[in-house]
Amino acid sequence: MSQNTLYEKLAGCNSKELSLGVITGKKDLEDLQPLVNYFTNKDAAVPGGVLYIFPFCEFALKLLAEFTPQVHVFNESCPFLLGALAVRAPGSP
């Protein structure tokens, strides 16, 4: 799936279908590797949902600007990731 297709898919969600969360590390992004491994290895998301995890990048900034333009927590040196949990709304295909 291309970045544009993924962005369109996520941007088309309403507040009941998409949750964004900032995942923080203590000092470095490497602090978050066990969490990323857990989600990857266990396929541990919500039934009927998909968890996307993004580092600091244009895509993450674009999602934040779309859904939470007042949040400015990312920069190139911060130990943060952006989690985007997309869940199908009840009754959606």
Image (cartoon, rainbow, N blue to C red):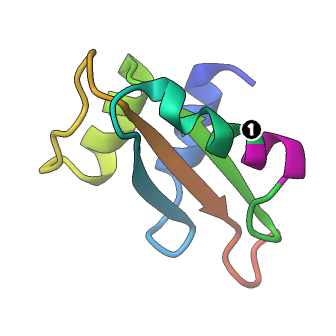
Dot 1: element: helix
**How would you classify the magenta stretch by its main secondary structure?**
helix
Please tell me which residue is depicted at 39% across the width and 26% down the height of the picture.
Answer: 28
Query: With respect to residue 66, does 85 lie above or below?
Result: below
Please tell me which residue is depicted at 62% across the width and 32% down the height of the picture.
Answer: 33
Percent position of residue 49, x then y: 74, 62
Magenta extent = 38-43
Percent position of residue 77, x then y: 26, 17
Please tell me which residue is depicted at 24% across the width and 52% down the height of the picture.
Answer: 68
Query: With respect to residue 18, does 89 lie above or below?
Result: below
- In the visual, does 10 lie left or right of 43? left
The residue pinned by badge 1 equals 37
In which image quadrant can residue 93 be found?
bottom right
The kind of residue tagged 1 is Asn
* Residue that lies at the very extreme toward the right in this rendered image: 42
Query: With respect to residue 52, does 89 lie above or below?
Result: below
Viewer-side residue, 4 vs 31:
31
Viewer-side residue, 51 vs 25:
25
Please tell me which residue is depicted at 85% across the width and 51% down the height of the picture.
Answer: 43
